[in-house]
Amino acid sequence: MIIKAIKIEPETAIKIFEKHNVLQEEIEDVFNDKPKFKKAGGGQYIAIGSSRNRYLTIFFRLDGNEAEITTAYPSDKCQIKSYKKMK
């Protein structure tokens, strides 16, 4: 999957930071570090990758080659294990 741009609405960025303590820069780090992708339901995808000494799980929709972020949070142990198996 090729992502050329990342779009995060200001309200979404605030929600992600307040609820999950994840910065927009961390989300960008994950996409720049070759994350692993999975298809989720409802036209969404999941990216799992590392940023600043932790793993993040990011949900997004595709609009062409642009990822529109819907949420992001620190990955749990099961997600990290799945990510490491995919490498």
Image (tube, helix red, strand yellow):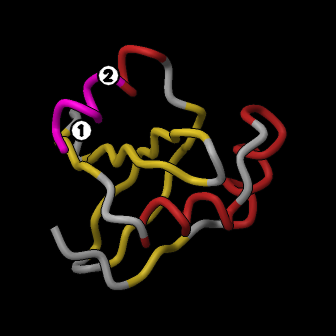
Label 1 sits on what residue type? Gly
Query: Label 2 vs label 1: CA separation?
Result: 24 Å
Dominant secondary structure of the residues highlighted in magenta in the image: helix
Residue under pointer 2: 81
- Circle 2 — which element? helix
Establish if 60 lies above or below 10: above
Q: Which residue is mark 1?
A: 42
Above or below, comparing residue 57 to residue 10 in the picture: above
Under tag 1, what secondary structure?
loop
Question: Does 37 appear above or below 9?
Answer: above
In the rendered structure, are the residues bearing label 2 and label 1 in contact, judged by CB atoms less than 8 Å apart?
no
State which quarter of the image contains the C terminus: top left
Q: Position of residue 27 (x, y in %)?
A: 56, 59
Q: Where is residue 67 shown, x and y percent of the image? A: 38, 68
Say few, some or many: other residues with alpha carbon within 10 Å of mark 1 (under 14 / 14 to 19 / 20 or more): few
List x then y, in percent, for residue 48: 37, 43
- Tell whether position 18 is magenta: no
As drawn, the residue found furthest toward the top would be 78
